[in-house]
Image (cartoon, grey):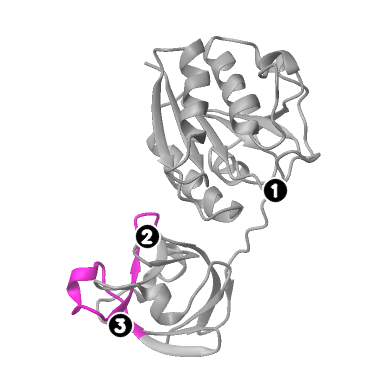
Amino acid sequence: MKVITFLSDFGISSHYIAQMKGVILKSYPQVNCIDISHTISPQHIQSGAFILRATIPYFPKGTIHIAVVDPGVGTQRRGIVVITKNHILIGPDNGLLIPAAQDQGSFTVYEITNKAYSNNNISNTFHGRDIFAPIAAHILNGIAFDSIGQIIHDFTYLNINKPTFSQNSITGEVVFIDNFGNIITNIDRSCIHENLQAGKMFSITIKNKTVQIPYHQAYGFIPNDQLLLTIGSTNLVEIALNQGNAAQVLDVSVHDSIVIGFS
């Protein structure tokens, strides 16, 4: 059975996702529809890109992913289909799809221009239903990718900063805050792996506030309501509060700079 996933900032109480699935199921009823998330912070492209990037490696080859975090809907921003060696990604040309595609190796980007593959009446505010979902249905039914539109090379990259290093510290950025309030950074485990001994203290500076936080490999190794530095399931450095919300306690937001000091 073919698989298609959905990611958006639409929330879970609206009709939008059901309409998108309906468009696809009318054309290809045997597809397996999977929701990745619909609680991305509204218009927060970077958070959507992070979740998409972290998720698609766990899906089978050939899966189609529709991602819609689209503050530019109805403007001149383009719709695109991205073809990688393992997956197909469909959504707006605002950088949302590209980090996930880059992780897959080489990829090709087609601009969606063939209106024959869209709904007859295209809403200015809902391209997910009227352009992206119909394109996915046609791909499921075997259309040639070059019939969608032209290959483009000037697609939008998402500006994701990389960590910087000094002799005794590393400076990164908060890229996502999950539902538990765990603070996920752009700092990979490999950047600090030599310092990852249980109980080792790190100096964490965010918004000109510095706290001392120990490293532990899981939340349960420290008492409740205490902070820890750990490596999360995406292999990235996280700051967490056991049985609590680290982002609230430290007053942290996505894009905040974070400095990890170590001796």
Q: Which residues are magenta?
A: 213-235
Whether residue 122 is in magenta: the answer is no
- The image quadrant where one finds the N terminus is top left
Where does the image place residue 254, in percent across and percent down from the top left?
Answer: 54, 67
Give the side of residue 247 with respect to residue 257, left or right: left
In terms of image quadrants, where is residue 190?
A: bottom left
Q: Secondary structure at mark 2?
A: loop
Task: Report the Cα–Cα distance between label 2 and label 1.
Answer: 27 Å
Residue denoted by label 2: 179
Image marks 3 and 2: residues in contact by CB distance under 8 Å: no
Query: Can residue 86 be seen in the rendering of this structure?
Result: no
Type of the residue with mark 2: Asn
Task: Report the Cα–Cα distance between label 3 and label 1.
Answer: 37 Å
Question: Residue at the spot x=70%, y=16% of the render?
Answer: 120
Type of the residue with mark 1: Tyr
Does residue 132 lie above or below 156 as drawn? above
Question: Residue at the spot x=18%, y=73% of the render?
Answer: 221
Question: Residue at the spot x=20%, y=78% of the render?
Answer: 224
Does residue 3 lie above or below 235 as drawn? above
Residue denoted by label 1: 157
